[in-house]
Amino acid sequence: MPATYESIATTTLGSAQLNVEFTGISQSFTDLVLVMQIADSTNDARDVYMQVGNGSYDTASNYSRTILTGNGTAAQSSRSSNASFMSMSYAVYSSSPLSVNIVHFMSYSNTTTNKTVLARTNGAGDGVSANAFLWRSTSAIERIKVYLQPTSNINTGSTFTLYGIKAA
Amino acid sequence: MPVTYKKIASVTVGAGGASSIDFTSIPATYDDVCILMSARSTGTNVNAQGFCYFTFNSLTTSFTSRRLIQDGTTVSSDSSGGRFAAYIPNSQATASTFGTMVCYIPNYRSSNNKSYSTDQGMENNSSTAYLQGLVAGLWSNSSAITSISIGGVIDSTGASANFAQYSTATLYGISKS
């Protein structure tokens, strides 16, 4: 029986580093799911940024987002256009505990449509968010980069696993 | 090729209902676990909604959570959820209607405190029992999770109830490699 849900790559950081990248992503799946548990080495709240691309990362103003957030006190909704990255709030809180973030890259290997990305972030000591992103490119996603802003190292012990899902 | 996403156990509540849905002796062979639940309560409060709660390793303490909740009119956020698992419709809701929950627990065997992500919702096609919730949960315990129970079903008034017949929950194990 062909596998529907496969692990493509996984990494657990043995030392703090600025970013995590998945490159040369197989184009044989329909959707991708990236599961991340992230801690910040400076023990301070950060946003998690992502860039994607094919052959190189798109650093132009081709990303937009609509987000819904809750910080345990208030709920907010906002959106932004023409950004050079995808950013997620409440995706990393401190050096501990680790956050839980699940990102779906829908139809990532499709070369006729712009790409939709759905992300859920969970920082139990910080907040929760639901994000809908658009990458305005019909290129297939061949690489994904994750990093923190303001600039900070991703802490030791953070885990990143990329899964591929086949529609048939 | 090893299976990445595999069913560990599934529970369907029979006639007469059940006070909890339990997954015990969770194997230590996966990296993450995920619970998918479809549930309804036997509660009778007229607002047609109830609640259920998590217990890990038979422990009800050391749970914290931040929630983002909307009911079609109001969006709110709170940090008082504790071990809250899901809103579920009760016996006053539209017949044959169940609430759903997906809970993802990465690295359930690690010696870190256990963070988890829960998405849940119920829709009733009426003026009651419609809610959607996103939850960031934390169980501040360094032990591996060996059992998960979903129970403590109550109405919004606090009156005790059970899971109704045909409520189901399935526990999946996910392997990273």
Image: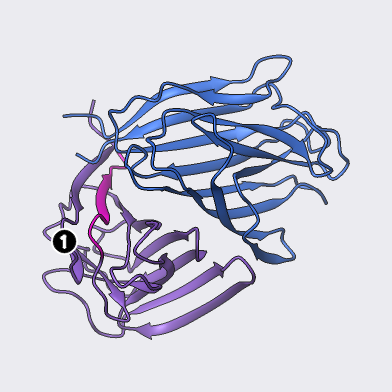
Residue flagged by tag 1: what amino acid is it?
Ser
Query: To which chain does the residue with label 1 belong?
Result: A
Q: Is residue B132 magenta?
A: no
Q: Which residue is mark 1?
A: A15
Rendered location of residue B66, percent (x, y): 57, 58
Which portion, as a residue range, is magenta?
A155-168
Taking the spot 37% from the left edge, 35% from the top edge, the residue there is B144
Task: Report whether A94 appears left or right of A14.
Answer: right
A119 vs B95, nearest the viewer: A119
Q: Which chain is blue?
A: B
Task: Report whether B62 appears left or right of B46.
Answer: left
Taking the spot 55% from the left edge, 69% from the top edge, the residue there is A68
Q: Secondary structure at mark 1?
A: loop
Q: Check the rendered structure and report the hue given to chain A.
A: purple
Q: Identify the image quadrant of the N terminus of chain B.
A: top left
Task: Report whether A132 appears left or right of A75.
Answer: left
